[in-house]
Image (cartoon, rainbow, N blue to C red):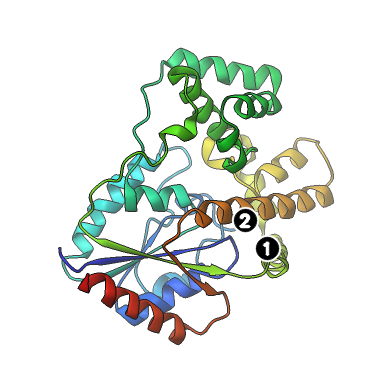
């Protein structure tokens, strides 16, 4: 499959990745692979900013609401599924677009997953018990001690991610971050990253407006329908967690909305921290015209395929 290129559209949440991905897919007459782990689940629509029906019909999309929150679906599962689909798509397409805010999922497809040690189930059970007895703050402090580097990048409000990192630290006696990016898997395609960026006030304003739009579109009702399943890993997601806390009697509605906006801004900062480690990203301004972005991409694609 020589000469096949995967174009990865990345950037912070609410920056306009979906819009750009669709424009690029239309230009290259190709299809879109979603690498946004929040959008995999069919029960979650409003709070995950799933593309609209009009957007989904504009070009073929894959991995949008293809799973249930009750089905386990790991980054390793996604890597295998996405690679199988890419082999199929590249039989008729020279370019495929992948878009999403989940840097780990994008990198899993492009580079492969890291080779972590096997975990004794008792270690995980112990950490889950610690979470129940001592709270998430305990896990946060433990990770800060065992792996300060990963502590800076991980979603500190996601107990699943904290437990995963800590169990690797405890079993291997090494920092979780030491296992990251040790090897790079061979792929049957070449990759170009293009990232959308904006000044921080612009990003924060777009986030606030998106949250307000989600609420106007029925986020509270959607969260209420999922409240009884709030312990599921798929629902450990900004926008739902804060409302679940409110439904459980912890804080007012106004406080929940404020927390959603604050935690979404934190999420955007972590996304940018992740992407800034990648020196190969072609960064473009969020409001740059599609024509200019396409011209830059076509130049990069030509150079990559001629190399």
Question: Dot 2 corresponds to which residue?
Answer: 268
- Is residue 52 in view from this perspective? no
Mark 2 residue element: helix
Calculate the distance from the C-alpha at mark 2 to the C-alpha at mark 1: 9 Å
* Residue 13 point in image, percent of width and height: 58, 60
Q: Position of residue 298 (x, y in %)?
A: 33, 80
Of pointers 2 and 1, the one earlier in the residue sequence: 1
- Where residue 141 sits, quadrant-wise, is top right
Tags 2 and 1 in contact by the CB under 8 Å rule? yes
- Residue 116 position by quadrant: top left
The image shows residue 171, relative to residue 256, as above or below, that is above
Q: Residue at x 27, y 62 (%)?
A: 190
* Depth order, front residue of 181/22: 181
The numbered disc on residue 72 is none
Q: Residue at x 53, y 25 (%)?
A: 166
Residue at 25% from the left image edge and 56% from the top image edge: 85
Q: Which residue was labeled with disc 1?
A: 207
Classify mark 2: residues with Cα within 10 Å, few (<14), some (14-19) or many (20+). Answer: many
């Amino acid at each position: 499959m020589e000469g096949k290129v995967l174009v990865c559209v990345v950037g912070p949440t609410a920056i306009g990745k979906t819009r750009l991905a669709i424009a690029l897919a239309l230009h290259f007459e190709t299809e879109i692979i979603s690498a946004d782990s929040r959008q995999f689940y069919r029960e979650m629509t409003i709070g995950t900013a799933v593309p609209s029906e009009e957007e989904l019909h504009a070009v073929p999309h894959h991995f949008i609401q293809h799973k249930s929150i009750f089905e386990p679906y790991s980054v390793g599962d996604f890597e295998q599924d996405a690679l199988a689909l890419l082999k199929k798509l590249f039989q008729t397409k020279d370019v495929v677009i992948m878009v999403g805010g989940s840097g780990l999922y994008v990198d899993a497809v492009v580079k492969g997953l890291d080779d972590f040690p096997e975990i004794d189930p008792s270690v995980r059970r112990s950490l889950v018990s610690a979470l129940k007895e001592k709270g998430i703050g305990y896990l946060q402090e433990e990770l800060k001690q065992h792996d300060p580097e990963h502590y800076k990048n991980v979603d500190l409000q996601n107990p699943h991610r904290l437990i995963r990192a800590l169990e690797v630290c405890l079993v291997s006696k090494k920092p979780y971050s030491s296992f990251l990016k040790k090897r790079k898997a061979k792929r049957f395609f070449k990759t170009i990253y293009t990232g959308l960026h904006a000044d921080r006030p612009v990003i924060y304003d777009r986030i606030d407006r998106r949250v307000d739009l989600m609420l106007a579109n029925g986020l509270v009702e959607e969260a209420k329908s999922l409240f009884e399943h709030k312990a599921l890993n798929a629902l450990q997601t900004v926008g739902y967690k804060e409302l679940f806390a409110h439904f459980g009697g912890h804080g007012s509605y106004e406080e929940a909305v404020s927390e959603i906006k604050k935690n979404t801004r934190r999420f955007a900062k972590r996304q940018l921290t992740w992407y800034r480690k990648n020196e190969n990203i072609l960064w473009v301004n969020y409001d740059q015209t599609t024509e200019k972005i396409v011209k830059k991409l076509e130049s990069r694609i030509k150079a990559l395929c001629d190399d």
